[in-house]
Amino acid sequence: MNPFRKPLLPDLSPFMQLLFTMLLIIACYSLIFLLGLLLAQPLFGISTEAVFASLASFDDPLSLQLLRYFQVLQSFGLFILPVLAACFFFTGNPFRSLRLDQGPKGWVYPALIVLMFISLPMVNWLITLNESMKLPGFLQEVEVWMKTTEDQATQLTDAFLKMPDTATMLLNLIMIGALPAIGEELLFRGLLQPLLKTWTKNIHFAIFLSAFLFSAMHLQFYGFLPRLILGLMFGYLFCWTGSLWVPMIAHFVNNSAAVVVSWLGQQGWISGDYEHFGETGNFWFILLSTAATILLLLLISKKGTMTAQPGNGNEKIPGDQKP
């Protein structure tokens, strides 16, 4: 007997599902953070007050351990657990309703790796364009806050990417590469995109709004535009292939590239750093990158069909309601 046949809340409207999901995110994150805070004392041998003080420092080794610890907890509390819980309530079978039970044709996977690397010059140009943004004078305080937030995020990323040994590099592949790719795709593409599609009756608007929320969630305003474009790419990849594994893998490749490039640079095997990897000022390279990215996306849209379909065609997905 399948225990995932009877969802607990099968008849909620898409709007109510969105609200319920927000409550689940708040509840799960609060619970995981509090449990993590309680466990931090025996795990790291410091008081709760010292935990908060340590989180403000990016240089101390113990502080970095704590920051990594809470970064991992955040992936589970903000993204993975609330999405799985929401789909359990709405559909009764999270794995199937999130389209994790099927994958695209085998050639799509290497195509995703090629896609993420050939898009680098285009993405880096978008970063440069975004960083040149200037707000009007009356919004100067907002601009200062945005720059401060961006600088803090950059400092934290740089601290994480200082990898003294192979174990730290492998941990970063999980913490920076895998967990955000899994968690953020579960939420923004697996859950929100279908809900928004059902609510608005427009898949393109649903993809755009999911990508917008995905970019805004990072609170890195000087990387908003390139992250929005990546979100759009992930959204259409999910739409075209019908498998959440596709944007997850593309997201993982994108995130892990920074880890691998930083590691290779610190080992002296390559020159440069992750921030400038794939960057070029050559207009023709940027144009070629953009054209190649679009062509490969079109190829995936035409050929990237699923190898498997849901069991009997009667399974619900987030946003569905009983007739």
Image: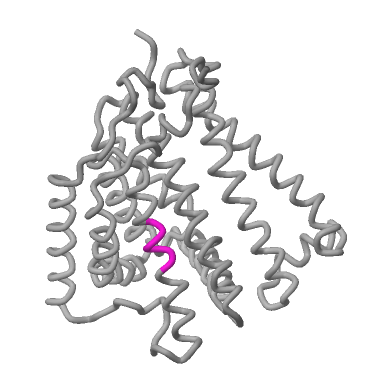
Residue at (38%, 21%) from the top-left corner? 316
First to last magenta residue range:
251-256
Residue 211 shown in magenta: no
Q: Is residue 58 left or right of residue 116?
A: right
Residue at (49%, 54%) from the top-left corner? 180
Residue at (33%, 58%) from the top-left corner? 225
Quadrant holding the C terminus: top left
Residue 29 in which image quadrant: top right
Residue 253 shown in magenta: yes
Residue 250 in which image quadrant: bottom left
Q: Is residue 261 left or right of residue 226?
A: right
Residue at (36%, 66%) from the top-left corner? 134
Please state the horizontal and vertical placement of residue 313, each as a whole percent of the image: 30, 21
In terms of secondary structure, what is the magenta stretch mainly? helix
Please state the horizontal and vertical placement of residue 160, each as a whole percent of the image: 58, 72
Query: Which residue of the protein is positioned furthest toward the top in this rendering?
Result: 323
Please state the horizontal and vertical placement of residue 218, each as a whole percent of the image: 48, 55
Name the image colouring. Answer: one colour
Residue 208 in which image quadrant: top left
How many circles with numbers are drawn on the protein?
0
Residue 73, placed above or below residue 311:
below
Please state the horizontal and vertical placement of residue 277, each as a whole percent of the image: 35, 78
